[in-house]
C-alpha cells in the first residue's frame, strides 16, 4: 500500500522526536551530578575561628594600650561584683599571717555575661594587679562562639586553674551582642576592626599589653596548651 507524502512527513517527525527523547543525557547534567556526589563524600572542614566586626565607634576611647581602661559611667549596668550581674572580678582574699593580702582566687565557673559591668570589672582587676603584681588576663568572647566554649571547658582543668590563680586576675567580657561599651573596652587594647574570638589579652599591672591573640596566635585550647600559654606570659 502506498503512503501519502503527508503521512510520511508525520512519521519522520515522530521518529525524530522519539530519538531526541531517548538519546544520551546532557553531559552538563552528568557533570553536575558527579560534582554533587563528590561534595557529599568530602570530609567536613574543622570549625573556623569566629570573627566578629566591631560596631561603629560612638566615641573615641580615652585610654591607650599603655593606660588603664576608662571608669564605668554613673548609669552603668549592674556591678560586676553583684551575683546577678555574672561577676568576673576576683574575690577578696583573707590576709596572710604577716599582714599582706593573699592572692585572690579567680572564678571556678566561666562564661560571658551580657549584663556585667565589664569596665568596672577590668578596673577592679587592674587595681588588684597593682597591689599584688599579678598580670590581668582579659578574655573577650561570646556564649555562642564554639572556640569560646572550648576555652571555658579548659579553664575548669585543675592545672590551668593553678597557673591562672598564681599569676593572673581573670576577666571575661562579652562581645557577642555587639555591645558598644564592651567593644570600646576591647579597642582600648586592640584597635582592629574585626576580632577572632576568643581574644585573649595579657595586661601588666601598669596597663601595658604583653600579648594579644587577635594579632598573634591563639594557644591550643587544651589543658597543656593553655597552661603553657599562661606560664609563657606570666612574668
Image: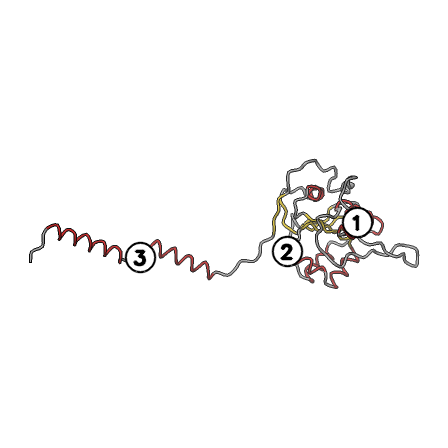
Front residue of 203/92: it is 92
User: In the displayed structure, does residue 94 sit left or right of residue 231?
Assistant: right
* Disc 3 and disc 1 in contact, CB within 8 angstroms: no
Name the residue furthest left. Answer: 1
Indicate the position of residue 92 as horizontal and vertical percent values. Answer: 85, 54
Q: CA distance from mark 3 to mark 2?
A: 47 Å
Question: Please, what secondary structure does the residue beneath circle 3 have?
Answer: loop
Q: Earlier in the sequence, mark 3 or mark 2?
A: 3
User: In the displayed structure, does residue 12 sit left or right of residue 211?
Assistant: left
Residue positioned 82% across, 47% down in the render:
127
* Mark seen at residue 25: 3
Q: Earlier in the sequence, mark 3 or mark 1?
A: 3
Indicate the position of residue 81 as horizontal and vertical percent values. Answer: 80, 50
Residue under label 1, please give it. 125
Q: CA distance from mark 1 to mark 2?
A: 24 Å
* Mark seen at residue 147: 2
Q: Earlier in the sequence, mark 1 or mark 2?
A: 1
Q: Residues within 10 Å of mark 3 (few under 14, many from 20)?
A: few
Indicate the position of residue 167 as horizontal and vertical percent values. Answer: 78, 55
Amino acid at each position: 500500500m502506498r503512503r501519502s507524502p503527508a503521512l510520511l512527513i508525520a512519521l519522520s517527525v515522530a521518529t525524530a522526536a522519539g530519538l531526541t527523547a531517548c538519546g544520551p543525557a546532557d553531559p552538563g547534567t552528568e557533570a553536575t551530578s558527579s560534582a554533587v556526589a563528590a561534595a557529599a563524600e568530602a570530609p567536613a572542614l574543622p570549625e573556623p575561628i569566629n570573627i566578629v566586626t566591631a560596631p561603629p565607634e560612638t566615641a573615641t576611647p580615652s585610654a591607650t594600650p599603655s593606660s588603664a581602661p576608662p571608669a564605668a559611667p554613673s548609669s552603668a549596668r549592674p556591678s560586676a561584683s553583684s551575683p546577678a550581674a555574672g561577676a568576673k572580678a576576683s574575690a577578696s582574699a583573707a590576709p596572710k599571717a604577716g599582714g599582706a593580702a593573699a592572692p585572690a582566687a579567680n572564678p571556678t565557673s566561666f562564661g560571658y555575661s551580657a549584663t556585667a559591668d565589664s569596665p568596672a570589672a577590668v578596673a577592679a582587676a587592674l587595681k588588684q594587679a597593682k597591689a599584688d603584681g599579678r598580670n590581668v588576663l582579659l578574655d573577650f568572647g561570646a556564649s555562642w562562639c564554639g572556640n569560646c566554649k572550648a576555652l571555658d571547658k579548659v579553664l575548669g582543668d585543675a592545672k590551668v586553674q593553678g597557673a591562672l590563680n598564681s599569676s593572673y586576675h581573670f576577666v571575661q567580657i562579652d562581645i557577642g551582642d555587639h555591645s558598644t561599651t564592651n567593644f570600646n573596652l576591647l579597642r582600648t587594647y586592640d584597635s582592629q576592626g574585626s576580632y577572632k574570638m576568643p581574644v585573649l589579652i595579657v595586661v601588666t599591672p601598669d596597663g601595658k599589653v604583653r600579648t594579644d591573640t587577635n594579632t598573634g596566635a591563639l594557644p591550643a585550647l587544651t589543658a597543656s596548651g593553655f597552661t603553657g600559654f599562661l606560664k609563657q606570659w606570666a612574668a
